[in-house]
Amino acid sequence: MKMYYHCLYKRARTPEQKQNVLDNLLKLWLKVPDQRLGQMIANYYFGCDFFFVEDYDFIGYLEHGLKEVKDGKKETK
């Protein structure tokens, strides 16, 4: 899983960084179009309390989920 350590606390602070988080969320959501947003996040987020997850760590989870969908390891429905 790719982690983003280039920004302080791995938090998206600028509009560009926030857009990056949303773009990654959209990439996965487009691959699993039958899932609701909350369902998709629950299915592809592999942590404990989502409230405490830093933005760029979350991107890593999304990228991992996207790879699983591409590799056929996760159902798309």
Image: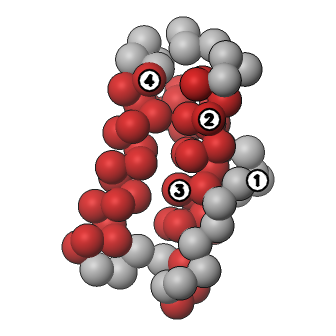
First in sequence: mark 1 vs mark 4: 4
Distance CA(mark 2)–CA(mark 3): 12 Å
Residue matched to label 1: 48
- Of the two numbered discs 3 and 1 in the rendering, the one whose residue sits closer to the viewer: 3
Residue named by callout 2:
67
Give how far apart the Cα atoms at labels 3 and 1 are.
16 Å
Kind of residue indicated by mark 3: Ile
**At 49% from the left edge and 85% from the top edge, which residue is drawn?**
7
Marked residue nearer the N-terminal end (3 or 4): 4
Query: Rounded to the nearest whole Å, what is the CA distance between mark 3 and mark 4?
Result: 15 Å
Left or right: where 49 falls relative to 58: right
Circles 2 and 3: CB atoms closer than 8 Å: no
Packing grade of label 1 (10 A; few <14, some 14-19, many >=20) is few
Q: Which residue is mark 3?
A: 59
Q: Position of residue 17 (x, y in %)?
A: 34, 71
Badge 2 or badge 4: first in the primary sequence: 4
Mark 4 = which residue?
Answer: 31
